[in-house]
Image: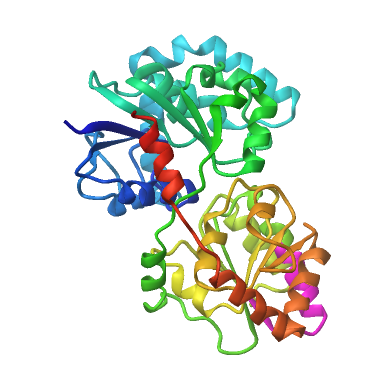
Amino acid sequence: MKNKILFVINTLGRAGAEMAMTALMNKLDESQYEISLYVMLAQGELIKDIPPYVHVINKNFCDKSVLSSQGKKNLNRLILKKIFAHGSIFKNIFYVISVLFSMIKKHRIQPDKLLWRVISDGSDVTDEEFDLAVAYIEGASAYYVHDHVKAKKKVGFIHIDYSKAGYTRKTDKNCYDDFDRIFTVSDEVKECFISVYPELEEKTKVFHNIIDEEKIISKSSEKMKYKMSDKGIRLLTVGRLTYQKGYDVAVYALKELVNHGFDVNWYILGDGPEYQTLAALAVKEGIDSRFHLLGAVDNPYPYYKAADIYVHATRFEGKSIAIQEAQVLGCAIIASDCSGNREQINDGVDGILCGFTPAGIADGIEKLITNPALATKFRMASAEKQINHLEELQNIYGMMR
């Protein structure tokens, strides 16, 4: 009889955790495991990449991006429905008020963190029992697996710097105490999580993101949706347009490069809530003809292949799928010296770790532009990095013994 595994995730947009989960599912032996998936908000374009042998529990599913205009409308309708389903908002009213006051004190109100538990309690519940239930991301999926899933063992995944992302024990209601294992995507993410849950150190292990190298290399030869300039230096960054990703600082860094006389175009692949703000900032700083907000694309890999330098200057990270993809495709990489990035880039060996300032980012880029031999060295070192997923798969298999 096959072991039954349930994966739960918040949405299926084209983001790092979602892509890593899809790659993991593709690595699991379908002859040995019966795999199910429940998506809390039943939306996301990555549903097309879910293996055909995975049973999607959601009765209805929207394959529109959660960041598209149509996708946002659909998402807001579903959130509103779940808030009132099963009387969830009324059961959680004191929780919401308490968490809201905590956020106000910290001058940081995050609606998603405020509503994840309400959404969890307003979601459908299955009577099916699983051998293993995996909450593949923080928030609603963790609360849902803890409160509403029957399973012999439960696992939670942490993909970000827990505190910087805005999570607290209060928002969690200490749900992780009852999980059988916590997997973090890097050592630094583990340290951040343990600082919040020190008593769970023995339960917590590192589980590196899984990516599909063969697929990445194969798709990198396909045609690009948008043409990149044949002239000058092509910079690339891939990621959602959010505060965490630091694109506002990238605008000022690009302006410094232009002021220093460099012919540079910076291409951004990704959608997000900061699109209009960033577009306006680029116009204000006079570099809008060089700062290209291309939106999300189904296949970003040809852009990595065509880029001269991949730049990943973020405020904080868990472990970046985009950096892993850039390494698979042999890019010269510059990343900010922050949690997550430090574990992926060996400064001076396979890339540059820079300060998270316009000057710090611009200096790193200038170093590679003016030293082609160094850029070539980094490209070769990136391409030579070995990725072995055997240990990660054994971690999952081991949970069912």
Residue at the extreme bottom: 231
The secondary structure that dominates the magenta segment is: helix
Please state the extent of the stretch shown in magenta in the rendering: 250-265
Q: How is the image coloured?
A: rainbow
Q: Position of residue 279 (x, y in %)?
A: 62, 63
Q: Is residue 136 left or right of residue 123?
A: right
- Residue 264 is one of the magenta-drawn residues: yes
- Residue 146 is one of the magenta-drawn residues: no
Q: Position of residue 89 (x, y in %)?
A: 45, 16
109 vs 132, nearest the viewer: 132
Task: Name the residue located 76 percent from the left edge and 79 percent from the top edge.
Answer: 258
Locate residue 128: give its quadrant: top left
Q: Is residue 122 above or below residue 18?
A: above
Residue 275 visible within the image? yes
Q: Which corner quadrant holds the C terminus?
A: top left
Q: Position of residue 229 (x, y in %)?
A: 56, 85
Task: Name the residue located 65 percent from the left edge and 87 percent from the top edge.
Answer: 232
Q: Is residue 209 left or right of residue 128?
A: right
Q: Which corner quadrant holds the N terminus?
A: top left
Task: Name the residue located 45 percent from the left edge and 75 percent from the top edge.
Answer: 302
Task: Name the residue located 55 percent from the left edge and 57 percent from the top edge.
Answer: 239
Q: Is residue 168 left or right of residue 153?
A: right
